[in-house]
Image (tube, grey):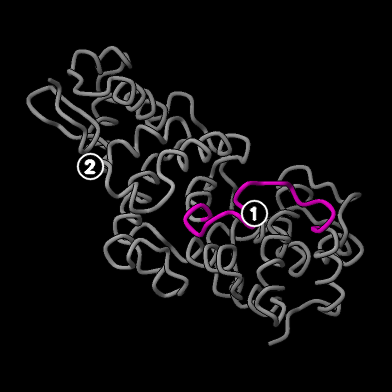
Amino acid sequence: MSVHTAVPLPVLHSTILDWYAEHARDLPWRTPQATPWAVMVSEFMLQQTPVKRVLPAYAAWLERWPTPAALAADAPGEAVRMWGRLGYPRRALRLHAAATAITERHHGEVPDDHAQLLALPGVGEYTAAAVASFAFRQRHAVLDTNVRRVLARVVDAVEHPPTATTAAERRTATALLPEADGTAATWAVAVMELGALVCTARTPRCGGCPVAAMCAWRLAGSPPYDGPPRRGQTYAGTDRQVRGKLLAVLREAHGEVTQAVLDAVWDEPVQRARALDGLVADGLVEPVGPGVYRLPGSAPRA
């Protein structure tokens, strides 16, 4: 399959791979010592969360739960507690569910088969491809936000990719993959790194980009984005902020918390109740009696 780029693929590949070899960040989940489980933990944590916030949480998590079986043996509420302030705490429950499934279905070893990875609870197409590629050096199109942005600019001459990943993007990403598995795996992380460090969303550093001279978007005059409005993420005053405050109280309590304690977290009662109901519905909080709550599976108060 061909892609809409005038640049020969071997040139594009070698240029980005050479750049990555020189500029890649030294991250613990990229070392040869990183286990497939460590790679999976990093992928869950890095979704919508900057690397600098993930690094300490990643180290603490693996120190406590170095294997899927270790996490599966603990309560899901402990995963939520350890998740701390990484945000989007449902990821902690999903990672716990994946660890449980790995322990029960795969003898505690993260499977190296893409289909088996995709069948794990909480693992979507991106995470399955990322783990297969980064942990097992397989050939898969790994499409996170950074990769999609690089390909949108370099290949499709648009500033930003569509809001949701499209079939056309998957076809393009697959067509761009080097043939050799190991090279394709390095290519996947190299393009991701280029998007994270150089081809950023708001202020791309085109002067430092190794493929600036090949970039279709730049060659077209860097036309501004003209698609649907891109919503900026807000936090202050949102239900998400209230949920975070409620969870913080429950994490620090190491046991049951009364409604009165939770009521002190946020002044607006309707929003507070809506946020608490959402946490319960998502399985992040358990009601254990009238007006008494705890993290899921936590030990009751003595």
- Which residue shows up at 42% across the image and 36% down it? 83
In the image, residue 52 sits, relative to residue 122, either above or below, namely: above
Q: In this rendering, would 222 be left or right of 225?
A: right
- Which residue shows up at 31% across the image and 60% down it? 103
Q: Position of residue 225 (x, y in %)?
A: 71, 54
Task: Evaluate if marks 1 and 2 touch, with contact meaning CB atoms under 8 Å apart.
Answer: no
Specify the segment rendered in magenta.
20-39
Quadrant (top left, top right, bottom left, bottom right) of the N terminus: bottom right
In the image, residue 31 sits, relative to residue 267, either above or below, namely: below
Occupied quadrant, residue 65: top left
Element class at badge 2 = helix
Residue that lies at the very extreme toward the left in this rendered image: 290
- Which residue shows up at 25% across the image and 30% down it? 276
Q: Which residue is mark 2?
A: 281
Quadrant (top left, top right, bottom left, bottom right) of the C terminus: top left
The disc labelled 1 sits on which kind of residue?
Arg
Ranked by sequence position, the earlier of labels 1 and 2 is 1
The disc labelled 2 sits on which kind of residue?
Ala
Picture disc at residue 87? none
Q: Position of residue 253 (x, y in %)?
A: 28, 20
Observer-side mark, 1 or 2, equals: 1
Q: Which residue is mark 1?
A: 30
In the image, residue 115 sits, relative to residue 26, either above or below, namely: below
